[in-house]
Amino acid sequence: AQTVTQSQPEMSVQEAETVTLSCTYDTSESNYYLFWYKQPPSRQMILVIRQEAYKQQNATENRFSVNFQKAAKSFSLKISDSQLGDTAMYFCAFMKNYGGSQGNLIFGKGTKLSVKP
Amino acid sequence: DSGVTQTPKHLITATGQRVTLRCSPRSGDLSVYWYQQSLDQGLQFLIQYYNGEERAKGNILERFSAQQFPDLHSELNLSSLELGDSALYFCASSLTGENEQFFGPGTRLTVL
């Protein structure tokens, strides 16, 4: 069974600074996807970024980028130029690639990020 | 707005009762997923449907059931409710099992 571990329950960062959230996962699969989701106080789950395991290049989305280390089974999220609106719970998630219609996310426990003015 | 809709937003009921949560996926998405978020268990996958058929099952209790209708909307039925069933229930949708999932706003269930 796959597991996802987020070792930092809470973090804080000053506005405009950079912060990195950690995530490790355990799997025997070679073909999978990794995601970061953001859950602000509104409780809506918002997709931040996606990484395919077969791609060596790290995914980026504007101020958000990942450091994907497949051998180490590590998938950290870097947020640059932090903004107050980045304050949220961040979840790392794993999804095995079944190659078709099946798919389900396995989530970590989350990291609560506070951006301070 | 993700394009996924869930009703109702909030539901308060008593132990032993039965409730139905409804989800409409994004236009064009064939796959619907149900997740439960609670303080104890975190975010857990319950069940997935693809184009009307069950595709994957997670930690879903026998008291819970779901289905996906021909118009692709889905319902999650929770029966013989217990206090521990109080949680935020999310529906998500995707085009196929390989695509990213987009979440609805959730239904907050409170069992008293």
Image (cartoon, helix red, strand yellow):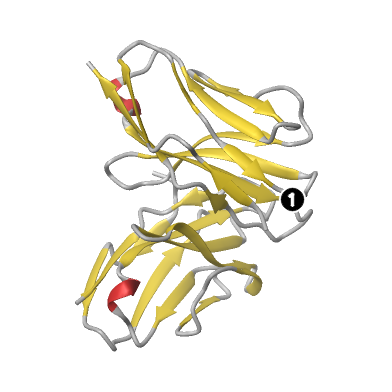
Image quarter in which the N terminus of chain B is found: top left
Q: Nearer the viewer, residue A19 or B108?
A: A19
- How far across and down, in percent of the image, does residue B6 sit? 37, 62
Total marks drawn? Answer: 1
The residue nearer to you, when weighing B66 against B27, is: B66
* Left or right, A29 with reference to A103: right
Q: Is residue A31 left or right of residue A92?
A: right
Q: Position of residue B30 (x, y in %)?
A: 62, 61
Q: Element under label 1?
A: loop
- Residue shown at 43%/14% (left/top)? A18
Residue name at image x 48 percent, y 37 percent: A7
Tell which subunit mark 1 falls on.
A
Question: What amino acid is at disc 1?
Answer: Asn
- Which quarter of the image is occupied by the C terminus of chain B? bottom left
Which quadrant of the structure image shows residue A35? top right
Circle 1 sits on which residue? A97
Q: Is residue A33 above or below residue A96?
A: above
Residue found 74% across the figure and 36% down from its top: A53
In this rendering, would A46 be left or right of A28?
Answer: left
- Quadrant in the picture for residue B111: bottom left
* Quadrant housing residue A56: top right
Query: What residue sits 50% from the left and 68% below the top?
Result: B73
Q: Residues within 10 Å of mark 1 (few under 14, many from 20)?
A: many
In-front residue for pair A23/B49: A23
Q: Position of residue B62 (x, y in %)?
A: 50, 84
Q: Is residue A60 above or below residue A5?
A: above
Tell me: residue B35, above or below residue A28: below
Left or right: residue B101 versus residue A110 is: right
In percent of width and height, residue B24 lies at 45, 63
Q: Residue furthest front?
A: A7
Using the image, determine if residue A80 lies above or below residue B25: above
